[in-house]
Image (cartoon, grey):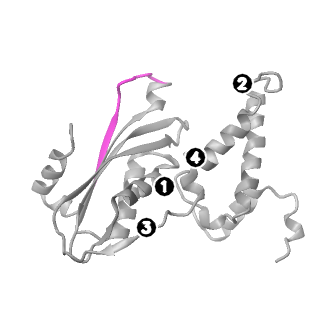
């Protein structure tokens, strides 16, 4: 299909935004928008972010033309945001191979600690921590490989996030994929918006949890899950 001449000169971010608005889809910081980005547009979006990041550096009165340390910083930051730390917004969900629960497993399974690398939506400061996932399967539960839990965590956390919302997003995704009798998630993370700026409290951490299904109803099962998490 020939390109629409009306699109000439229109920033790629505007085109993507128009598609999202037309589809009435939300595009908050922690949303995935991959289905609205055409394959060739990600590189163009990278170029656009680079230009705007250079504007930020200029407004910070940093002489990137003469400072050898910051000459390519705008490009590096653009690549960091789109291809690394916020990649979970711009790429599709990783493929997850699911297997039937042929042996009718129905015992508690815990995966973790899995490393969390994210960023706070408020200041774009790093959020670094660990996550533990407890699954109570049933005979109809889809079984996924252990490494796939890490891939799902990386995909959800690779966006600007608020910890409380991120854990709920992850729980919704795992429930949809595996359909277990119960799901429990605990996340512990350090927020650089507290240690690097603000109150500068270096040892502060945030711990929160989400319980679904039988973990909500069965206090003994909850205690078993929490007792099996080292140090918790």
| Residue position for label 4 | 84
Distance between mark 3 and mark 2 Cα atoms: 41 Å
Distance between mark 3 and mark 4 Cα atoms: 20 Å
| Residue position for label 2 | 69
* Residue 86 among magenta residues: no
| Residue position for label 1 | 155
Distance between mark 2 and mark 4 Cα atoms: 21 Å
Q: Nearer the viewer, mark 2 or mark 1?
A: 2
Distance between mark 1 and mark 4 Cα atoms: 10 Å
- Quarter of the figure with the N terminus: bottom right
Q: Residues within 10 Å of mark 2 (few under 14, many from 20)?
A: few
In the rendered image, the vertical position of residue 214 relative to residue 72, given as above or below: below
In the rendered image, the vertical position of residue 112 relative to residue 20, given as above or below: above
Of the numbered discs 3 and 4, the one sitting upstream in the chain is: 4
Outermost residue toward the left in this view: 220
Which of the labelled discs sits on residue 96, or is there none? 3
Query: Which element type, helix, strand or loop, lies under badge 1?
Result: helix
Distance between mark 3 and mark 1 Cα atoms: 12 Å
Q: Are marks 2 and 1 in contact (CB under 8 Å)?
A: no
Query: Which element type, helix, strand or loop, lies under badge 3?
Result: loop
């Amino acid at each position: 299909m020939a390109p629409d001449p009306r699109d000439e000169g229109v920033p790629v971010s505007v085109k993507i935004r128009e598609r999202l608005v037309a589809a009435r889809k939300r595009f908050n910081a922690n949303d995935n928008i991959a289905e609205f980005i055409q394959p060739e547009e990600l590189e163009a979006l990278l170029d656009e972010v680079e230009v705007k990041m250079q504007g930020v550096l200029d407004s910070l009165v940093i002489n990137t033309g003469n400072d050898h340390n910051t000459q390519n910083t705008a490009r590096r930051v653009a690549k960091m945001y789109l291809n690394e730390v916020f990649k979970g917004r711009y790429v599709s969900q990783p493929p997850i191979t699911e297997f039937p629960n042929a042996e009718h497993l129905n015992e508690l399974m815990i995966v973790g600690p899995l490393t969390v690398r994210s960023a706070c939506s408020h200041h774009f400061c790093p959020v670094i921590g660990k996550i533990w996932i407890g699954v109570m399967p049933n005979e109809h539960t889809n079984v996924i490989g252990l490494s796939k839990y890490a891939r799902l965590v990386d995909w959800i956390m690779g966006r600007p996030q608020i910890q409380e919302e991120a854990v709920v997003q992850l729980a919704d995704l795992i429930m949809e994929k595996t359909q277990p009798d119960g799901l429990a998630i605990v996340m512990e993370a350090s927020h650089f918006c507290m240690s690097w700026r603000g109150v500068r409290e270096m040892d502060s951490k945030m711990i929160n949890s989400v319980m679904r299904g039988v973990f909500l109803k069965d206090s003994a099962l909850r205690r078993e899950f929490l007792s099996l998490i080292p140090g918790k």
